């Protein structure tokens, strides 16, 4: 039993590093960049509050687990801004290596369960994973809208990019949320001529 708890505590101590991984996105008040641990907490809250937007086959408890675990790989791989200039193949390789290392710290059984949830989220083929991806994608645009555009200007984001990079996963996992978000995005981008 002691060995199991030792492994779990080592994993939990390692997970604390997620608090130091800064994301490209800023807090709504603009005071600083959000860290990945804050992002994970916030999208879990989004999923809980917006659970009524999930399909009938979606298990919200599994979604919450996916959202809690999905960004732990950023401890090793760092954050890859969705609108940044990123080598996606290289980043995917870093994230897989990070998942291998981090989840292997856990005791057998737990290691396999958590890794399977992470893999399922990444593949986005199940109803649970598609809803989790949708929630992961909606939080930043909502925050950017609330803060007058957030980092969109910094990354030269266009409406077309948002429809492709954000809209596609949201439509797949939570179409009602996309129906809510789309007119707000169009209204934001239309006056500036960026759409």
Image (tube, helix red, strand yellow):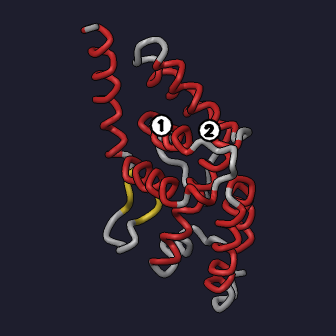
In the displayed structure, would residue 3 be above or below residue 112?
above
Q: Secondary structure at mark 1?
A: helix
Query: In terms of image quadrants, where is residue 33?
Result: bottom left
Q: Which residue is mark 2?
A: 121
Considering only order in the chain, which callout, 2 or 1, is on the residue closer to the N terminus? Answer: 1
Q: Position of residue 127 (x, y in %)?
A: 70, 43
Q: Position of residue 104 (x, y in %)?
A: 46, 17
Q: Residues within 10 Å of mark 1 (few under 14, many from 20)?
A: many
Q: Is residue 84 visible?
A: no
In the displayed structure, would residue 128 be above or below residue 112?
below
Q: Is residue 74 visible?
A: yes
Looking at this view, name the residue that lies furthest to the bottom: 191
Q: Which residue is mark 1?
A: 69
Left or right, 23 with respect to 179, comes to left
Position of the C terminus by quadrant: bottom right
x 48%, y 70%: residue: 143
Judging depth in this view, the residue of 128 and 39 nearest the camera is 128
Q: Position of residue 91 (x, y in %)?
A: 60, 39
The answer to whether mark 1 and mark 2 are in CB contact below 8 A is yes
Q: Position of residue 79 (x, y in %)?
A: 49, 47
């Amino acid at each position: 039993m002691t060995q199991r708890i030792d492994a779990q505590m080592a994993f939990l101590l390692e997970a604390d590093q997620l608090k130091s991984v800064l994301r490209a996105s800023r807090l709504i008040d603009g005071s600083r960049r959000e860290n990945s641990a804050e992002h994970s907490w916030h999208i879990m809250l989004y999923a809980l509050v917006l659970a009524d937007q999930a399909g009938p086959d979606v298990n919200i408890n599994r979604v919450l687990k996916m959202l809690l675990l999905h960004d732990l790989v950023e401890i090793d791989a760092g954050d890859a801004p969705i609108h940044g200039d990123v080598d996606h193949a290289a980043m995917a390789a870093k994230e897989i290596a990070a998942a291998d290392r981090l989840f292997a710290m856990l005791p057998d059984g737990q290691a396999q369960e958590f890794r399977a949830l992470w893999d399922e989220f990444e593949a986005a083929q199940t109803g649970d994973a598609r809803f989790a991806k949708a929630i992961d994608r909606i939080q930043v645009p909502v925050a950017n809208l609330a803060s007058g555009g957030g980092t969109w200007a910094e990354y030269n984001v266009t409406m077309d990019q948002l429809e492709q990079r954000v809209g596609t996963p949201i439509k797949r996992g939570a179409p009602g949320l996309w129906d809510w978000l789309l007119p707000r995005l169009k209204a934001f981008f239309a006056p500036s001529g960026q759409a």
